[in-house]
Amino acid sequence: MKSDIIFHQLFEAQTSTYTYIIADKKTKEAAIIDPVIETVERDLKLIKELGLKLIYILDTHIHADHITGAGEIRKLTNAKTAVGAEANIPCIDIPLDDGHELFLGDKKITVIATPGHTNTCSTFFFEGMAFTGDALLIRGCGRTDFQQGSSEKLFESVHGKIFKFSDDTIVYPGHDYNGQTVSTIELEKKFNPRLCETQTKAGFSKFMSELKLAHPKKIHEAVPANMTCGIVPSKHIFHPQVVDGIPVVSCENLYSHMSDIISKSALLIDVRRSDEFNAELGHIENSKLITLGPDLTQFLKDGDRQQEIIFICRSGNRSGQAATEAMQLGYKNVINMSGGMLRWNDLKQPKIKK
Ligand SMILES: [Fe+2]
């Protein structure tokens, strides 16, 4: 390690992600590579303790397994976010192309486009170190079966670009699942079982096509969030009070948020019987009838656990049971409309009846 730079390798255990802090010792200008939203506070504390001035927040690619801390760190530091231009992310300050150069003092970070794991992957080269993201892991590599991944492209990126660095270049990967922290180009050329020097493109593609990996747990959450630099606007309309373990919203509050309910695609589910739905008490416009019992259970079993659902019934009792059932099935954003259609009618709020 050169004496005129500062370097820290940090780890996020839930997704086995490495975050790196690199800096020029003289000017204290720093960059953070691949921050994770859950560990932003830890990383910023270290940056402060080291007396660094954060200039860049770099992501090696659009991650599928975790949410980037980039947007959150930018808010707190005014550093600039940067990721591969291919990602086409409007919130990014600096879209990175192959050969792009960024400076920390007089020290250069060179961006090398290394697509294959995704189409936006970059490797950052800085002072004898290669931050390879998921293009090259220690004795492994990132998967190539989603986010425009391509085993052919990854092979070309690793053999045609990363392996062209000098043998003593230190390799710092985006993840490690086996407790390893660092490698070198020489070691990976010799011992990487997927991508070593003697591997062929066809052999690598065959190996990758046979992996059959499960999708990362957070992919549906992480990829959209990372397209907005990790800043996730709250999708949920209500921040309900919890009564007897069940989140509740009043009829008045629900009524005043009708346009949000429609625009944010929250679901109003009326759990009464169909004869009640159309009888004197009527039902709320845009509510969907799914009767408590087998119909509702089946619906909930098949549904998206992040969906915001407001349950409605006659008095708030059955809808409370529905909310409880949904929570037991893992729903995170379910609410009971307190007082039910009786209260709704008392307030003379609009209803539909046949
Ligand atoms: Fe990745």
Image (tube, rainbow, N blue to C red):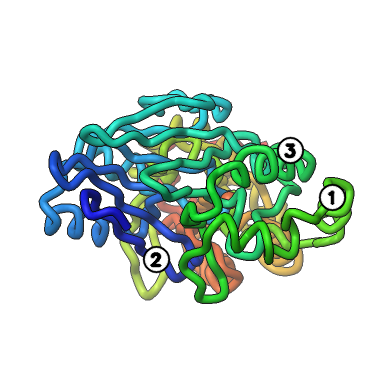
Q: Amino acid at mark 2?
A: Phe
What is the spatial separation of the Cα atoms under label 2 and label 1, in whole angstroms? Answer: 33 Å
Residue at left offset 69%, top offset 58%: 215
Q: Nearer the viewer, residue 133 or 296?
A: 133
What is the spatial separation of the Cα atoms under label 2 and label 3, in whole angstroms? Answer: 28 Å
Tag in front: 1 or 3: 1
Q: Is residue 232 visible?
A: no
Residue highlighted by disc 2: 11
Tag in front: 2 or 3: 3
N-term-proximal mark, 2 vs 1: 2
**Quadrant location of the N terminus in the rendered image:** bottom left
Residue 153's tag is: 3
Q: Nearer the viewer, residue 6 or 241?
A: 6
Residue highlighted by disc 1: 200
N-term-proximal mark, 2 vs 3: 2
Residue at left offset 62%, top offset 38%: 161
Q: Is residue 99 visible?
A: yes
Which element type, helix, strand or loop, lies under badge 2?
strand
Q: Amino acid at mark 1?
A: Thr
Q: Nearer the viewer, residue 261 or 137?
A: 137
Residue at left offset 35%, top offset 63%: 10
Q: Position of residue 325 (x, y in %)?
A: 58, 71
Which element type, helix, strand or loop, lies under badge 1?
loop
Q: Residues within 10 Å of mark 3 (few under 14, many from 20)?
A: many
Q: Residues within 10 Å of mark 1 (few under 14, many from 20)?
A: some
Q: Nearer the viewer, residue 254 or 44?
A: 44
Residue at left offset 59%, top offset 44%: 162
N-term-proximal mark, 1 vs 3: 3
